[in-house]
Structure formats: C-alpha cells, structure tokens
Amino acid sequence: MSISRFSFPTPIVFGVGARKQVADHFKAQGFSSVMIVTDAMLSTLPFFTNYVVELKATGLTLDIFNGVKGNPVKSQVTAGVAAFKKSGASSILGIGGGAALDVAKAIALMVNHPGDIFDYEDEKPGALPIDKEIPYWVAIPTTAGTGSEVGRSTVVADETTHVKKVMFSPRLMARAVFADPELTQAMPPAVTAATGLDAITHLIEAFLAKGYHPMADGIALEGLHLAAKSLPAAFANGNDLNARGDMLMASMMGAVAFQKGLGVVHSCAHALSAVVDMHHGLANGIMLDHALAFNFKAVPNRFERLAHAVELKSGADFLPWVKNLKQQLRIPATLKGAGVAPDKLEPLFKVALADGCHLSNPVSVSEQDFREIFSAQW
Ligand SMILES: [Zn+2]
C-alpha cells in the first residue's frame, strides 16, 4: 500500500447570521483594520451595503476594494495589492462568489511575494516558491458552487492571451470561512441552478476520480445527498434558508472532496468556457449526463453508490435522474439546445484533451472519446 496525505483544515463558522461573528473574529486574532475585496456589482447591493454598516459599527477600520469584474484577471490583482498597501489594512475579508474570493486570495499572495503573479504559476518550470508571509484573510461566500472559500488555489487569467493560470499552495487557504446561507438568497434562479450544478459536478467527479481517498469519497456522497434534496428547492424558492444552507454546505463539501481529483465533465466544461465563453456551472450542467455516460460504461459499480446517495435503487437510474434534474432547473439538455454551433467542435475536442482534469477520470479519455461525447449532442 502506498502512502497517502489528507488535509481538511479550514475552520468554518456555518449558519444563518454567521456573518455577524466576523468582526469579533478579526478582533480576537488581533486585527482592527480590514480591506474588503468584492465584486463591483455585488458592492452596490443592499445586503452588502447594510453589512458594511454593521461591520463599521463594531469599530473595525474598513477599506473596500470592489475592483473585481467578471472572471479574475491580473490587473484586478495588481490594483488590489496597491489598494491594500495604500490602505494600511492588516487583513483581508473576501466577500462574493468564486471570482471575488479568488482575487482576494491572489491579492493576499502578492502582498509579500515579489515579481509577477504568474511567476508563481503551479508546476511551471522555474516557478518561484510561495514561501513568504500571506496576510490573514477570511472568506464569506455569497454563491454556492465553486467552493473557492475552502480551496487551495486561485485562478487568474492573463488579460492579453485570456489563458487562465493556477496558483496553488495550502498556504493560500482562507484562515476562516463564515458561511451564511442568508447571503446566498440574492442569487437569481438561473445562477442558483448553474452554480448548484457546478457543486453537484464536483461531488460526482470527486467520488468517481481514480485514486485512494475514502475521506473525500465519504464527503462527496453526503454532499451529493444534500444537494440532490435541496438544489430543486433553492431554485424554486430562493428564500428557503434550509435549502440555501444545504447548497452552501454541499458546495464546500464538493471543493473539499475534489482535492482527490475531477474528471471528464470538467475538461469538457473548461473547453466550453475557453471556446464559446460559457458560464462554468452551466457548461458542467449541460455536459454532465453526456460525459458521465462515458464513465458509466467503465465503472458501473461506482454509479450504484452515487444512485444510493440520491435515494435511487440502481446505478442505471442515475443518469436519467441527472437528465430530469437538468429539466427541472431549466438547463438545456444538449449543446445544440444551448445554441452552440457545430463548427466549434474541432476546437472543443482540442481544448478538452489538453485540459488536466480528465487525467484523474476513472478511465482514460482519448481525443476520439471527446469527439463522441461532444458530437452526440447534435
Ligand atoms: Zn467546477
């Protein structure tokens, strides 16, 4: 038996109103000045402005950097580092979805690490080590999908080439997460569906990924159980706080579990984001049943366990369940239904094949396999 390493270290405060404990947390850690990193659009919403008023009333000194727009790019990080240094803040509070939290993480990285952020790209030959002090930072997620708040990496794009680069280190993790379901109520149904399907894809792919990780497997199955029950409910009624709470928990469980690996669905989704600029969660949602059908032939026994997690009797019922879930959430059944033109197929195969996620798929995926998975949808 080979030696394995497991790590699940993020302190998480979870529940309705958890955000109200953030100020005391910073003070208990000895920090009185905090820079909030958030998304430009989100920073105008009433829940955000009200929260800032609440935080200021506690006596914390606050600065706000709201320069996150769309997906993270390098200039946002550079501007955020400059704002942090100018503010004199000693700690960072990231509030938002995956983009805002990834930028918060990247700013924390670059405060004390010299040079260009891409000098720290994971597994790049000659990359600089992430070994200097990272400012204390805390995450408050406002979506339930990426699980970036418990993740160890940040994804930032080069704005000229649009290539996304991953900076990875366990030292980048948030020092604490305050996960408050009330803050996810602002998501409209289409965002709830797409981000929720991203979480479900993480849970399924982490469980199916090859490799020895029974802890991740257990977390993935229970997370899938929660998400299967609560995603349709959160979609139907965004104010259902029990369903919102289950989805927030399931999304963190997905991100914790996928340290084991992801698979073929994510490689297809990454290709769709690169080639037709599709939302990541929507891309996973559209591809999920088509790409999993490829895995079902290879590892039917693993689908028995997935089926039991969503209270079905047999593994053969799992893919029909996914199709039905998509329909309930008004996700297009196919790429054709989503309006993707067939002339995009060639670049889709190439980008999907070059993507690293399918390397941990339970069976290897060839270019021909990607061709069949994508082409079958027209
Ligand atoms: Zn994902």
Image (spheres, rainbow, N blue to C red):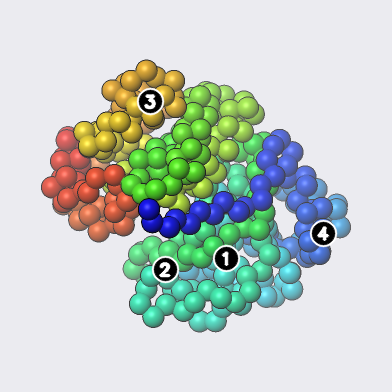
User: Residue at position x 57%, y 55% from top?
Assistant: 101
Residue located 78% across and 61% down the image: 29
- Estimate the spatial distance between the alpha carbons at disc 3 and disc 4, rounded to whole Å: 46 Å
Residue, disc 3: 307
Q: CA distance from mark 4 to mark 1?
A: 22 Å
Closest to the observer, 53 or 151:
151
What mark, if any, has residue 171 been given in the picture? 1
Q: Is residue 231 above or below residue 19?
A: above
**Mark 3 vs mark 4: which is more N-terminal?**
4
Q: Considering the numbered disc 1 on the image, is that residue within a helix, a strand or a loop?
A: helix
Separation (CA) of disc 3 from disc 1: 36 Å
Asked if the residue at label 2 sits under 8 Å from ligand 1, the reply is no
Q: Which tag, 2 or 3, sits closer to the chain's start?
A: 2
Question: What residue sits right under mark 4 in the picture?
Answer: 27
**Mark positioned earlier in the residue sequence (3 or 1):** 1
- Which numbered marker is on residue 122? 2
- The reply to whether callout 2 and callout 1 are in contact (CB within 8 Å) is no
What is the quadrant of the C terminus in the image? top left
Disc 2 and disc 4 in contact, CB within 8 angstroms? no
Give the SS element for disc 4.
Answer: helix
Rendered location of residue 223, percent (x, y): 51, 35
* Residue at the spot 39% in from the left edge and 48% down from the top edge: 212
Using the numbered discs, state the Cα–Cα distance from disc 2 to disc 4 in whole angstroms: 33 Å
Whether the residue under disc 3 has CB within 8 Å of ligand 1: no
Q: Is mark 4 within 8 Å of ligand 1?
A: no
Q: Which secondary structure, mark 2?
A: loop
Q: Is residue 92 visible?
A: yes
Q: Is residue 61 visible?
A: no
Amino acid at the residue labelled 1 = Arg
